[in-house]
Amino acid sequence: MAAATAGGRVIDLTDRRAVAAHVPADPEVVERARRLKEAALLDFGIKDSVVASWLYAKCHHQIPTTAVPTAAVVAAGDGSCLLLYNPVFFDALGVHGVKFVLYHEARHLIQRHLYVDEALRADPVFTVATEVSINHVVLARLGRRELPRTAEGGGTGVDPREVHRGYVRDLRGQGLEPLGYTAFVHTDLSVYGELKRMACPPSPLPVCAHMGAGVPTDPETVERVAKEVLSEVMRQALAGNEQARAELLDLAGRTEGGGERLTRMWGSLGLAALRGETPRTRRVEWWKRWLSDTLAAKLREGERLVYPKKLGAVLLSLGHDPMLSRRGPERVKVVLVAFDTSGSMPDSVVRWLTTLVGQTDGVETHWLSFDGAVMPFAAGERVLGGGGTDFQNVVDYAEGRLEVGGRVLEQRPDAVIMVTDGYAPRVTPADPGRWIWLITDGGDTWPETHDPPMACHRVTTGDH
């Protein structure tokens, strides 16, 4: 049983009835606390944190209880998550303080999913480092400079700047050079590494419920819920949600150096596509994986309205208006693939691109070859070397201003894949976000420095 001791009484924190019934607070206080909690969660969804918003959407039971001193996300062994919050504490904090505490607790659960090494988590210095890192992020994202306090002046957590000041004093006392605050909090592990340099590292104070005993964190539940949250936020980020993108990039950046497991985890979530880059490697498979991820992000599923005939007939017979449901892809996606014939193009690249696009459901592919002019090209044909190169002709064709084979491209491409050495006058398409540049060996990767930058990667043509 995962339990907490409150007032001399042991309480199972996974027992919803027990925690709700434990020394109930004044009903007016409970109602004010509930409103503060709901206002905080609304702000998360609108502007503050997509990760926190999705995490609390997974907490189907949100219980005001004095069984916890502050707040805690409980991951029970039955696979459920509960948000427990002390209504007296929330009422004393106000909405800004409640937002801080809830954001802090959400990051705690995500951190537990990211750092699974038991020896690391058992180190009290890492506990302090986690508190410092989380509170720094929460303060930064909420636009605050100080931790919230209750009306009585009580603190709500570990102050990252105070910890940094103690770290500076300690290292200078040893004759060592400390890092500035920004470098100190750069990643979770940078905080941990610098605290380990101290002669007397700080000990964690039990101001966070997760620091004390008895808050259930079932590993399987944590893994499932955190993975679902990160996957959903990544989906939103790849679909163009800038808030989700910024938050995920920050979270990924703070876990840099965390080991192979974290690298694989972020890779499987699609971080490469989000960043528009791929991990540094000489193996040819990486550019292929990068293009697959990038193309998938640009060709995400849409929706179309469908009239359900059987359900519609039933609704009409009952006197109700018929309903339209949303189902399936919005339309066939259009991909334009253009091969630069001004230099020798490896057959392996052509074959693989043909396979990639051919296996993508709901995609209509248009193939071109180009040098100084644009020419029709059938997938699978050998691409021969030609003369000079003009990217603008491809741009004009993609944007419907140039005829090829007596016809203009009537559809607007969802993605344009340019396979080239990059050596030609630079261009600015009307929608750079739709363009993907694959630069062959020794080519010019100027598209990645374009303003705004375009998706760009170097294609290796051998096995190394």
Image (cartoon, grey):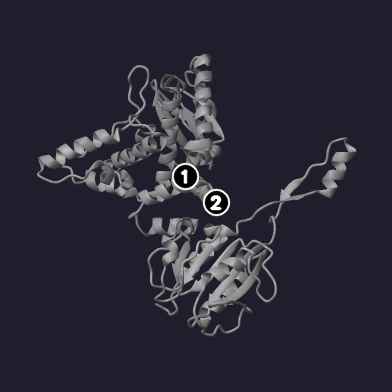
* Percent of width and height locating residue 45: 53, 37
Label number found at residue 222: 1
In the picture, the quarter occupied by the C terminus is bottom left
Q: What element carries label 2?
A: helix
Please report the residue visible at 25 percent of the width from the left and 33 percent of the height from the top.
Answer: 162
In the picture, the quarter occupied by the N terminus is top left
Which residue lies under the disc numbered 2?
235
Amino acid type shown at disc 2: Arg
Q: Which of 351 and 396 is in front in this view?
A: 396
Indicate left or right for 326 with 69 as reference: right
Please report the residue visible at 51 percent of the width from the left and 34 percent of the height from the top.
Answer: 82
Please report the residue visible at 42 percent of the width from the left and 66 percent of the height from the top.
Answer: 446
Q: Which of 166 and 370 is in front in this view?
A: 370
Please tell me how crowded label 1 is: few (under 14), some (14-19), or many (20+) other residues with Cα within 10 Å: many
Amino acid type shown at disc 1: Val
State how far apart marks 1 and 2 are (Cα).
Answer: 20 Å
